[in-house]
Image (cartoon, rainbow, N blue to C red):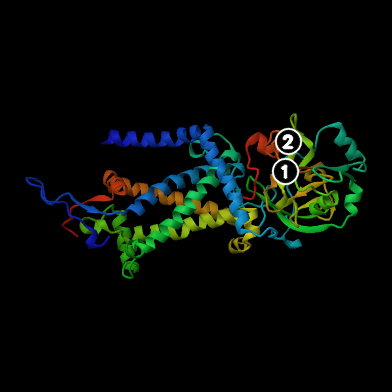
Amino acid sequence: MIGRRRFIAAGTSGLLLGGCDRLNNSPGFRAVLRSAEKLNMASQRLISSRDALAREYGEADMSPFFRSNGTRMPAGEDYARHLAEQFANWRLTVDGLVARPLAIPIRTLRSLPHRTQITRHDCVEGWSAIGKWHGVQLSRILDHAGLSTRAKYIVFHCADRFGDKPFYESIDLVDAFHPQTILAWGMNGHLLPVPNGAPLRLRVERQLGYKHAKYIQRIEAVDSLERVHGGKGGYWEDNVDYEWYAGI
Amino acid sequence: MNEADVNPEPPQAAAPPPATHRIAYRHRLPTRLWHWINALTVFVMLMSGLMIFNAHPHLYWGNFGANFDQPWLSFRGRPIPGWATIPSTYNLAAARRWHLAFAWLLVVGLLLFIVVSFINRHAQRELAPSSDEVKPRHIWHDIREHARLRFPSGDAALRYNVLQKLSYVAVIFVLLPLMVLTGLAMSPAMDAAWPWLIDLFQGRQSARSIHFICAMALLAFIIVHLLMVMLAGPINEIGSMITGRFRVPPERPDQ
């Protein structure tokens, strides 16, 4: 009896430990797990109105110090030069499936009507920080550029790199036209600090932190993500298999 | 289980040991099915959740909480060892895929089990403690019996005792629903869709802390539950959760 019991116990733990890792490496099982991402996205979109707002907090609720994550200082001479020039020559390019490609100087972006929102930044790792953001609604820029009806995704190309890979992210049009989705040039009443994405970063408040691309240089409208870099819609999605839909 | 559900084993022709191994039908199919689906799911959720915890092993109260804020619980490095996590080496992305896929099994299974258990009256008959059972004297008596490792025999072994009832009710109707709601409250999209989630738990980091505390309470339940199964006779107990049939321990004279 003891033998059988011990056999069952050893078998169970072996199955749990080794089996889970083996399942984790099986493409078929990964595909099953992956399908949950679409289910999560579909069900969250189903129960949520298109413009449902993320909670906006008061000044008193703000984090005393807003943690930065990922790149804190982009490498390379180009960024160093822009920083030395205080981003005077930084332009945001808007191209892809748009009627009127744009190259907007950062000064001009800052002079456009802007939105200020105190929101919670939720990192995929589990921490949260609350900060105040100032920026122009992405919808305003996209309307100005004349988004094609073929466009399905907005891709953000960034100035920072991880090794030899440029950072990029993407969102779909539901989030792109959400009223709280802004291209932020300011944080906590000041111009955006370098660790938080100077001179321009995305705020997409219903998704996790890694979607909030920093150091944005170019916005591209596309009909498919397949031909952009690794094809999964973002640096983290391509390289470590984070979900493209990061609403949970 | 009420008397009508008890099926005595048909008498055997020339069986010398008298009146020992009466077999009774103890667990209905929905209970058994959910038990095993849920056992698997809860293990996956706990182990993938502990991997996610490794990514930021600090817990806070309130809406925000990050490295420069004051945690109420904090560990260095990656505190949870590989044997307790899914996958066994650090991989936040994979752990999240497991966690957020198996969460559906947990929720759908739990909801179905609760609905079915009210329809087939499992909840009212076997899980709900009677007013006599929740009297302090009765509970205290059960605690003493448990502490002396004296388990019910005879027909009493076919019913859940009050400590069992209370712990099953706590897990099914309190802990598991809290796990789900605090899990949802950590989702930025859910907080936009259902803003009451954040109000209910007084902040996203509070929800995360409660998620962790409930997970540890579930773990404690599992440990005690498995210990009790081992002490009460694992073959009979596990077998009855598979087949539904339970070998009734003979009546002790002192009961």
Q: Nearer the viewer, residue A93 or B170?
A: A93
Mark before the other along the chain sequence, 2 or 1: 1
Left or right: B163 with respect to B102?
left
Left or right: B185 with respect to A141?
left
Q: Which residue sits at x=10%, y=50%?
A: B18
Left or right: A140 with respect to A127?
right
Q: Which residue sits at x=25%, y=36%?
A: A1
Counting from the top left corner in percent of width and height, residue A182 is at 78, 52
Q: Chain of mark 1?
A: A
Q: Chain of mark 2?
A: A
Number of labels in the image equals 2
Residue that label 1 marks = A170
Q: Are marks 2 and 1 in contact (CB under 8 Å)?
A: yes
Q: Please name which of the two marks, 2 or 1, marks the residue nearer to the observer.
A: 2
Q: Which residue sits at x=90%, y=54%?
A: A111
Q: Quadrant of residue A220?
A: top right
Q: CA distance from mark 2 to mark 1?
A: 10 Å
Q: Residue furthest top?
A: A164
Q: Residue furthest front?
A: A149
Tell me the quarter of the image containing the C terminus of chain B.
Answer: bottom left
Counting from the top left corner in percent of width and height, residue B227 is at 35, 47
Q: Is residue A48 above or below residue A7?
A: below
Counting from the top left corner in percent of width and height, residue A6 is at 33, 35
Residue that label 2 marks = A228
Task: Specify the amino acid type for callout 2.
Answer: Val
Q: Which residue sits at x=41%, y=47%?
A: B37
